[in-house]
């Protein structure tokens, strides 16, 4: 086990793996569901919440730290499918 992975609890590692699976599901769904893609482009948080695909920031951070290659591959696949402004919409604070 690498030093980086040893810094996290088993629960954190499990949550990071769930986030990776969620990203994989999102990528898969974007490849066939034009309605989901449209909703995701217009209101990412609402679309992800409605699809049960919201991810916790901490889980993504642990994924980035413990499996950066997997995270990078997922991001590359995702950004091949979404608009370039998607990331900004995802991380912008909600002002509702």
Image: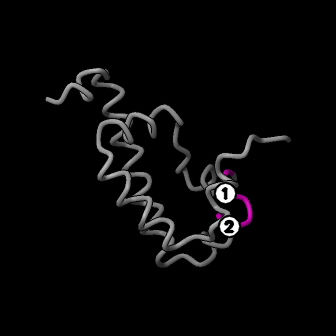
* Residue 72, horizontal then vertical, whole percent: 37, 55
> In percent of the image, x 59 and y 78: which residue is there?
34
View extreme (right): residue: 96
Image quadrant in which the N terminus is located: top left
Image quadrant in which the C terminus is located: top right
| Color scheme of the displayed model | one colour
> In percent of the image, x 52 and y 50: which residue is there?
53
Q: The magenta stretch spans which residues?
A: 40-45
Q: Is residue 44 magenta?
A: yes
View extreme (left): residue: 1
> What's the magenta bit mostly, secondary-structure-wise?
helix
Q: Is residue 92 magenta?
A: no
> In percent of the image, x 57 and y 56: which residue is there?
51
How many numbered marks does the figure carry? 2
In the picture, the disc for residue 44 is: 1
Q: Is the residue marked by circle 2 packed among few (<14), some (14-19), or many (20+) residues within 10 Å?
A: some
Label 1: which secondary element:
helix
Report whether 1 appears left or right of 44. left
Depth check: give the residue in front, 69 or 50: 69
Report whether 56 appears left or right of 50. left
Report whether 15 appears left or right of 37. left
Label 2: which secondary element:
helix
| Vertical order, 33 against 22 (above or below) | below
Q: Is the residue marked by circle 1 packed among few (<14), some (14-19), or many (20+) residues within 10 Å?
A: many
* Residue 15, horizontal then vertical, whole percent: 38, 34
Depth check: give the residue in front, 56 or 85: 85
* Residue 16, horizontal then vertical, whole percent: 37, 38
> In percent of the image, x 47 and y 69: which residue is there?
29
Which residue is denoted by mark 2 in the rendering?
A: 41
Q: Are marks 1 and 2 in contact (CB under 8 Å)?
A: yes
Task: Give the Cα separation between the discs numbered 1 and 2.
Answer: 6 Å
């Amino acid at each position: 086990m690498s030093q980086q992975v040893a810094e996290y609890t088993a629960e954190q590692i499990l949550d990071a793996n769930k986030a990776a699976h969620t990203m994989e599901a999102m990528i898969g769904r974007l490849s066939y569901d034009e309605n989901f893609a449209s909703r995701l482009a217009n209101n990412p948080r609402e679309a992800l919440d409605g699809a049960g695909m919201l991810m916790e920031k901490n889980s993504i951070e642990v994924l980035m730290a413990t499996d950066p290659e997997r995270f990078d591959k997922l991001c590359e696949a995702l950004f091949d499918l979404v608009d370039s402004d998607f990331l900004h919409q995802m991380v912008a604070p909600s002002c509702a």
